[in-house]
Amino acid sequence: MTKEEKLEKRRAYYKSNKEKLSAQAKKYYKANKSKRQEYGRNYYHEHREEICEKRRQYKLEHKEELSAARKEYRRNNKEKMAELDRRQYQNNAEYNRSRRKKYYRENRECQLEYAKQYRQTPKGKAVSKKSKYKRRAIKAKTKHESFDPMEVFWRDGYKCQLCGKKTRPDYKRNHPLYPALDHIVPLSLGGEHTKLNTQCLCRKCNNEKYNTGVGDQLRMFG
């Protein structure tokens, strides 16, 4: 009997007795768990380079397949993966910070150029606006919410809440009818950075009002 015939015979036997052989293997492993684990550790240390090379080769040959499997697993286990990521970040917070600082120092020019390009995108502009108002609220030691100023403009229909004129976001920033996010009660006077305390004003009315607090009283929005 040739080698191929023997292998085929073994495969056929395994297929026809799969459940029985699987149960025997589990029973044997439970009875010899510590012994098998010790054998596995010793084998890994003795053949570490060979095993690592095989793993690297396998990952290269099945890169797309493994990536899709990881994404699918994360989608099906969002809560579990979020908790795992949170624990890993907390346990390695200092190490992660040092890595980020080192990477930034080594790639400072590249990072600055990327940040400059990102700030020119619609998403980057929105993030910059959020950060600006958050810094102002923290500096004024008042409450702040995280929201996009565009939400307030859409709510008010891009209409100036003082003069009633329609603002135009496609105008230049210094144009009198360019929309500006206004705090009804200014942050400097104890107002909060919330949707409830913000409104759409044209640039002209916003400049005239400044931080005097003169204008509409605090209104309730749904």
Image (cartoon, rainbow, N blue to C red):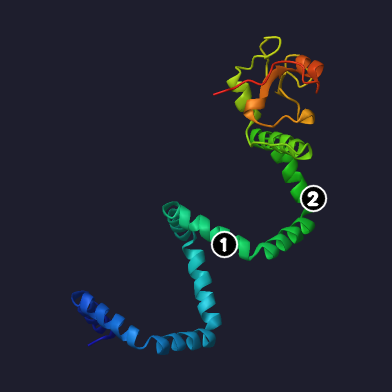
Left or right relative to 55: residue 31: left
Residue 48 image position (x, y, % from top left): 54, 82
Residue 161 image position (x, y, % from top left): 67, 14
Residue 87 image position (x, y, % from top left): 57, 62
User: Which quarter of the image is occupied by the N terminus?
Assistant: bottom left
Report if residue 190 is visible in the image.
Answer: yes
Q: Quadrant of residue 103?
A: bottom right
Who's the residue at 65% across and 33% down the image? 122
Report if residue 170 is visible in the image.
Answer: no
Who's the residue at 53% across and 88% down the image? 46
Which of labels 2 and 1 is toward the front? 1
Q: Quadrant of residue 102?
A: bottom right
User: Which quarter of the image is occupied by the C terminus?
Assistant: top right
Reading the chain from its start, which is encountered first: label 2 or label 1?
A: 1
Who's the residue at 81% across and 15% down the image? 208
**Which labelled disc corresponds to residue 87?**
1
Label 2 crowd bin: few (<14), some (14–19), many (20+), radius 10 Å = few
Mark 2 is on which residue type? Glu
Judging depth in this view, the residue of 222 and 4 nearest the camera is 222
**Which labelled disc corresponds to residue 109?**
2
Mark 1 is on which residue type? Arg
Residue 27 image position (x, y, % from top left): 29, 83
Circle 2 — which element? helix
Considering only vertical position in the picture, is 160 above or below 10?
above
Considering only vertical position in the picture, is 144 above or below 208?
below
Judging depth in this view, the residue of 12 and 100 nearest the camera is 100
- The mark tally for this picture is 2
Considering only vertical position in the picture, is 208 above or below 74?
above
Q: In which quarter of the image is residue 160?
A: top right
Circle 1 — which element? helix
